[in-house]
Image (tube, grey):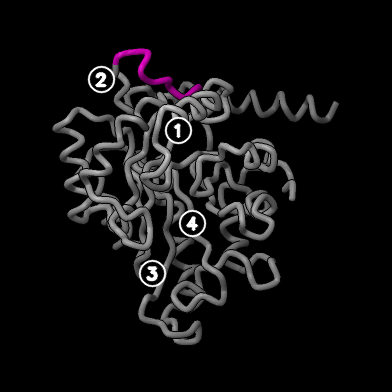
Amino acid sequence: MNNIFRTLIVFGIIFTSCERKFNLNQFGYEEIDAPLIVPPTPDAEAVGKKGVCFTLSSDRFSTKISTLQAHWFYTWGPGLSGEVYDMKPEYTEFVPMQWGKWNINDERVAELKVFRDAGKMHYLLGFNEPDKTDQANMTVDEAIDRWPKLMEVGVPLGSPATTNPLNDWMKEFMQRATEENLRVDFVTVHSYRGASVDNFINMLEDVWNEYGKPIWITEFAVADWTAATPEDNKFSPEQVLNFMKGVLPKLEDLEYVKRYSWFSFKESSSAGTSSALFDSNGELTPLGEYYADFKPNVFIGPGKD
């Protein structure tokens, strides 16, 4: 009976939010001839903005998602094995990603469509940092050449996530996509800047002005790339916590920011020790506690690992 009552509450909140949140025009659906794309259902549109990102190999990845009370998550992969769907906490959304240039073929498209038709996916994320040789490592030509296959999946498609959303690689890709009439429904952003809230928000404003598309911040944190050891990191935990406290409410208020996901470094990371959401014992840091409590997914189920 408790489960039934809980489910009714979820559906009530979702559907009373639909009129306010479900806006087809935000993805430019009017420019796409059906049935090339399947719009997200109203309940998918009503998912909260706060997300997390952990690899499947991360210790207790499912429990971490639940502990942080995330509304959605991704793992830098497509989730085709089914493990993600078996392990994900209830009442949270998984978003698949096509990480690199491999296996983009009819078989991959067909597999993703199966998940789409089963209601297990509503969005697809594009390539991960293709401008870096130690990440997806793609030329703009390679990305453009493979992009139509990702479009075939038929869900709103996020841009490649470059190390800087305003760098030459990204600008060339977006220009070429426009010229060749390729669909990019939202822009994904990675950002590892300092602890200035204003600088971060100004960067997002520049991205919005440059591309004019909804924004998903799929990785962001405060990092000191010059630090040789965690002790050398110039950003204290207090500074990073103050940054998070200042920036999260602004992200909720910005209409063009649709989703965001904090990247949790390990405490042992020289560059990002102060941005860790969990300590070495797997417990929430003060930063993690704030993130978990901010706009929580109160209906999320427990982890399954």
Q: How busy is the neighbourhood of tag 2: few (under 14 within 10 Å), some, or many (20 plus)?
A: few
The residue beneath circle 2 is 31
- Mark 3 lies on a secondary structure that is loop
The residue beneath circle 1 is 123
Q: Looking at the rendering, which quadrant does residue 256 occupy?
A: top left
Dot 3 amino acid type: Ala
The residue beneath circle 3 is 195
- Mark 1 lies on a secondary structure that is loop
The numbered disc on residue 262 is 4
Q: How busy is the neighbourhood of tag 3: few (under 14 within 10 Å), some, or many (20 plus)?
A: many
Q: Which of marks 1 and 4 is nearer the N terminus?
A: 1
Q: How far apart are marks 3 and 1 (CA)?
A: 30 Å
Residue 102, x across and y down, in percent: 40, 44
Q: Which of marks 4 and 3 is nearer the N terminus?
A: 3
- Please name whichever residue, 173 or 191, is drawn nearer the observer in this view of the structure: 173
Q: Which of marks 3 and 2 is in front?
A: 2
Q: Which residue lies furthest to the right in this view?
A: 1
Q: Which of marks 1 and 4 is in front?
A: 1
